[in-house]
Amino acid sequence: MSSIDEIIERYKRDVDMTLIEESLRRTVEERIRALEEFERFREELRTATERQRDALR
């Protein structure tokens, strides 16, 4: 086995295949909706973090 193969095998150990399989069972529309929901959450988290940072200054 080459060193690159060893590196790939090490990364694969930490990949949760159930999450990939779950995503692949979704339709394109469901995947897009999930991405949009995640983006909304990310934006809310960013806003809350900024507010907290400003409050501490």
Image: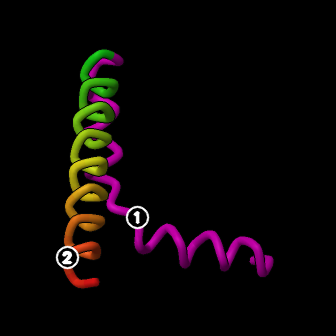
Question: Crowdedness of circle 2 by 10 Å Cα count: few (<14), some, many (20+)?
Answer: few
If you read the primary sequence from the N terminus, does the residue marked by circle 1 or circle 2 appear first?
A: 1
Q: Magenta region, mostly helix, strand or loop? A: helix
Question: Crowdedness of circle 1 by 10 Å Cα count: few (<14), some, many (20+)?
Answer: few
Q: Is residue 25 left or right of residue 2?
A: left
Secondary element under disc 2, as helix, strand or loop, is helix
Residue 54 appears in which quarter of the rendering?
bottom left
Q: Nearer the viewer, mark 1 or mark 2?
A: 2
Q: Is residue 32 magenta?
A: no
Q: Is residue 23 above or below residue 20?
A: above
The structure residue drawn at horizontal position 20% and vertical position 72%, both measured from the top left corner, is 52
Q: CA distance from mark 1 to mark 2?
A: 38 Å
Number of numbered tags placed on the structure image: 2
Amino acid, disc 1: Val
Q: Quadrant of the C terminus?
A: bottom left
Amino acid, disc 2: Ala
Residue under numbered circle 2? 55
Q: Is residue 45 above or below residue 30?
A: below
Q: Is residue 10 left or right of residue 30?
A: right
The structure residue drawn at horizontal position 22% and vertical position 83%, both measured from the top left corner, is 56
Residue at the outermost front position: 57
The structure residue drawn at horizontal position 77% and vertical position 81%, both measured from the top left corner, is 3
Q: Quadrant of the N terminus?
A: bottom right
